[in-house]
Amino acid sequence: MSVEISGFAPARFSAVKDVFAASFADGEELGARFTLVEAGEVVLDLWAGWADRKRTVAWNERTLAPIFSTTKAMAALMIARLVDAGKLDYGQTVASVWPEFAQAGKGAVTIEQVISHQAGLPGFPEQMDPVLWFDPAAICAKLAAMAPMWPVGSASGYHPITVGYITGEIFRRVDGRTLGQALAEDIARPFGLDLWIGLPDNEHDRVADLQRPSAVPDFGEINAATTAAFLTPWSSASGRGQADWRRMEIPSANGHATAEALARLMGALGNDGWLEGDEILSPALIAEASRERIRGQDLVLPFVMSWGAGFMRNEPNFPWGPGAQTFGHSGWGGACAFADPARKLGGAYVMNKQGVALMGDARPKRLIAAAYAAV
């Protein structure tokens, strides 16, 4: 049975709509949305399927999706805005704004090293109660006291959850607000972007139900860093209900958004920083935030990675089309958001049937390839 696709796709994007429909016809999707922005204008926006596992609630333009690590793109933007405002420098030490972080030999660790996953703090090797993740102050104290698991600056090792607590604490100490609060006050509300880090209770009924992955991701060769990051019983929050998770602010992992809001945000970064007539980030800072900080075999992910200042860079794996300057972030299960300054593009894909790929889920890759063929 064919699925009804809502939204719009001009004739030049008919192939994208066909690809989207095929993913549903093949049983790869439950509910999903894909949005593309070109030169600041939404030029493609498609959604279809179901927001619940029982298939009783249709996915619509207000359906929020959990975006997991795609949240990191929003956090990277918020840190970049502090740098743009002269309140922070990527090269200064974390300890210069958070003195306690200097413990265990981390006094020289810089902000750009932390947010490009070089700090050696991918997770906690020692056993702990996973409920502790719901206490940001306690987690930040543990991270401040922790010794790096590898020499800082020698390699990247993806910090799936911990980087959000570190980023959030840096932001709070510089700005005075939480990162999620500032995102809402400075970006989301003024520009009508339906994106959140810390979801208010009155928005919870809009969130799509997740259908979990059918298998465990392939982490490649397992080492101590991979284990601490992903594979211990305490590597992520548990022990409390879903509502507690949604209302938490974890700037690495628990954002909620529509594809349209994410695409408009990333579209601004692909369009010299302009969003609805206002500059949210200068072109110089877009270039600085997205430039390479480290490249090489990641110690946690089974990929050679190129990291900017909190952003994944498209090369060398190219999950988001052909652009060498493209940057963004992928999230657990398949969500992604990207900006391509060379073509003035921004795009996002969200869904609720999670895949097993750690990066470069086949569903958005096909949509993005079809979109690039039309621009």
Image (spheres, helix red, strand yellow):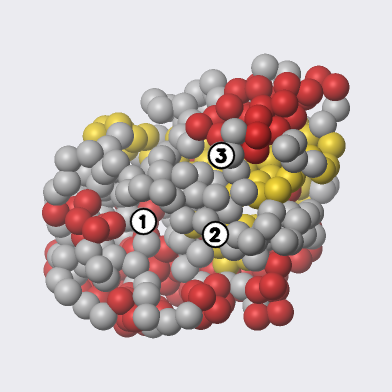
What residue is disc 1 on? 160
Kind of residue indicated by mark 3: Glu
Q: Residue at x 22, y 77 (%)?
A: 128
Q: Disc 3 versus disc 1: distance between alpha carbons? A: 25 Å
In the depicted view, which residue is nearer to us: 263 or 28?
28
Q: Residue at x 24, y 58 (%)?
A: 231
Question: Residue 21, position in %: x, y?
Answer: 70, 33
Count up the numbered dots: 3
Q: Residue at x 39, y 26 (%)?
A: 316
> Which mark's residue is nearer the viewer, 3 or 1?
3
Question: Residue 44, position in %: x, y?
Answer: 78, 35
Task: Tell me the quadrant of the picture where the C terminus can be found.
Answer: top right
In the depicted view, which residue is nearer to us: 55 or 20?
55
Q: Considering only vertical position in the picture, is 330 above or below 114?
A: above
Comes first in the chain, label 2 or label 3: 3
Q: Residues within 10 Å of mark 1 (few under 14, many from 20)?
A: many
Kind of residue indicated by mark 2: Leu
What residue is disc 2 on? 210
